[in-house]
Image (spheres, grey):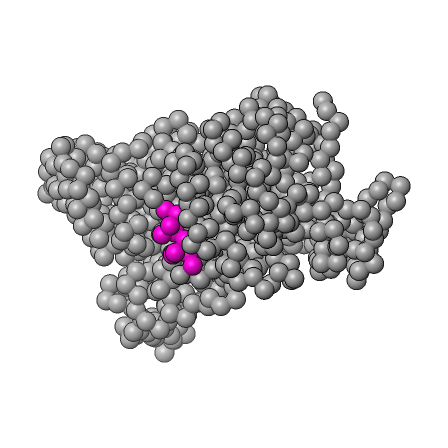
Amino acid sequence: MTNIERKENQIMEEIKNRVRTILTDGSLDYKQKKHHLAYIAESTQSYPEVSAEAMTALNEKVICDLFEGSAPYRPRYILPDYKLALKKGVKYLELDPPTDLDEAINFLSILYAHVPSITGYSVYLGNIDQLLLPFTGDLSEEAITKKLKLFWRYIDRTLPDAFVHANIGPEDNVIARTILRIERELKQVVPNLTLKYDTDITSDDLLIEAAQTVFEVAKPHIANHKMTAADFKSDYGVVSCYNSLPQGGGSHTLIRLNLKKITDSHQGNAEAFISETLPKYCQITLDIIEARIKYLVETVNYFQNDFLAQEGIISLENFSAMFGFYGLAECVNQLMASSGHNYCYGKHEEANQLAHRILEEMKKQVDSRPLPYCEANNGKAFFHAQSGIDIDIEETAGARIPIGEEPDIYAHINTVAPHHHLFNGGISDIFHFDETIKRNPSAILDIIKGAFKKGMRMFTFNLSDSEFIRITGYLVRRSDLKDFREEGSRYGSALFAANSMDNADVDKRIAKRIDSHERTAGQY
Amino acid sequence: MSELQANISGIIKSSVIDGPGNRMVIFFQACNLNCLYCHNSHTIGLCNLCGLCVQNCPTQSLKIDASNKQIIHNASTCTHCDNCLKNCPENSSPFYKKMTVEHLISEIEEVKDFISGITVSGGEVMLQSEFLKQLFISIKTHPELNHLSILVDSNGNIDENRWNQVLDWVDGFMLDIKAYSSDVHKKITGHTNEKILNSIRYLDSKNKLSELRLVLVPGYNNSKEEIETISGFMQSLSPEVRKVLIKLRKHGIREKYHYLSEPTQLDIAQAVEILESDKHKLLVI
């Protein structure tokens, strides 16, 4: 056997072993196995052509492609123009435009099953109230509730992925209210939910209804509609974990830079970090983004072949890519410590200022790099504070303040709000409230309105004793976590991290119907 | 602007339990009642510079500043053991501060975008009604603060002229009825309650009473007769007044009153049965 043959044999053996591991893994159901097998098949292909330095950064997780796979054959985030589809029908699926609510729900249910994504499940279900309102006719609220409840059950059972995301608002309407009511009643993990909130459009009543829903099921997130809408040429949707993207398009890819790791290996002070290390790694990240986009568009020819593109439900002009990062807090704290200061992000003004400079520099790098097939954002990537995944043990999500180190609510908002405007691709900070707020939901309104006035783009909050627990950006049910460590923990800080890890342990023992497929895809 | 000062025992910039919405709460030092179950007994008295707290501080974090008639507190060495509070014969504290209206306004300005309003509490705030009037006028005539609602949390043991000083500037008052019978009231608070009952009636007649609370103290104010007379009094007030039944909680009350017992489920149920009516809903917390 030649050396090459020996190497090939070895690779084949490895693949066989990985396949066997999946086939025999009792924690995966049939569909999850298929998803992971496809990932292995994809991994047999060479990575889109990038420099050796970029490849090393990927292998060492300095830059993370979030398990998108080595041969992108579908965009990471697709936001179909469901409104257009409902109006025109879908030839590929032999669907005529619906004429009533039953037909509309049935139409969408079918279409959802055919929207590609990294997880295999559509990350976007549409601005569901706007989509369905034209079909309510003279139906009673009772009739609407019954139909929507079945629809919601269908979504949870057939799209069992925590990243599947629906939007409602900003207008107050019967569908939005019914959905919130159904959410409180059914207590499902799927779909994730965002309320687009606009002070001038959304009623206080609807926002209170939303807050009361958060008390029960830790969703919806509240998006600052006016601020987000201004970043897009036409309609946008909030999908997956706080990613805001153009409707009728989406994002080819999301590559995130690990700011902690590049700080670990950085030699020199904060100035050198901002002027040398950071720009260098931003460009490598953008190189990887560019290579992946080209592979998808030019090699796979996705936009020529997929029915969504062929029928105009998505179009290439409405796509861009996402540049993400995480571990800002660790990056800032380490740079501060190495210059002899004990200043922490979220606690000290000096550290906060450094954080802002780092973010501004990254934004500058992203905005000055032209990318192919990114017309949706004028040829540039969307900038995104990535909300983390379970494998992030040492790094804090995006630009968040580390769990357990958050200052009081006003200081917290005042620290993060000044940089929210940078993130046209989305950003999130999670706030925790004591149970007493349940008796006084208008207090939440005050804080959300104040936060948006200060320039926050997205507001997510949790109750300290909620049955639903948010892990980075998606939800799990407390009762789904068998060995949840509850004792002695005040919510918020240590508990959150514990959840993340406990969840990972649970994954290994029992098959779960609902998963965060994005996270698990690269385990095998 | 005025040079008036008030003794402020603390400020909470975000509270969700002191009235509707998110509120900033300002606590005033000194009270004219002395309730057995007071959870903030260190806000009852004023400091007379006796120095017992200084002597009892294990970390020497307190010093008497005789010339300025105040206690100086070193926050960096203080371990928050509360020995000073436990040893104060005046039910006071070395921590309250004198603050001006201007100072409080600047504190409110910091959080104005996040709150529905402010609540003043105590101690007994109305003892400093002249200061309150200045504070409230400053808020309601301030272009960026005038949207804030003002709530006053008071024990009601105050003459009518003091209410009149602030009435026009206040959105609502939250008062307690600690007992209806004067004897029971005296046992709980050390004082009789004629003034308090008058205050409740007066504020209600002015449509300014937003909340009336009863703290249920077993063995004191939970007899059938007592609850029935309280109920009759409550029913005579406007239905719009929010009525709240609060369970006595022993956490945080002075050690010498630890013999008090918390009400049982049955105690609560019996009180609710008498107090609640179709027109007068009762919130139990």
Task: Give the residue displayed 30% in from the left and 65% down from the top.
Answer: A512
Task: Give the residue displayed 62% in from the left and 29% down from the top.
Answer: B162
- Residue A437 in view: no
A1 vs A35: above or below:
below
Left-right relation of B256 to A204:
right
Left-right relation of A232 to B250:
left
In which quarter of the view is residue A26 placed? Answer: bottom left
In which quarter of the view is residue A516 placed? Answer: bottom left
User: Which quadrant, please, contains the N terminus of chain A?
Assistant: bottom left
Task: Give the residue displayed 68% in from the left and 51% down from the top.
Answer: B42
Task: Give the residue displayed 79% in from the left and 51% down from the top.
Answer: B74
Magenta: main secondary structure: helix
A471 is within the stretch colored magenta: no
Horizontal and vertical percent position of residue B283: 41, 47
Horizontal and vertical percent position of residue A492: 51, 56
Q: Over which residues does the magenta segment extend? A: B267-276
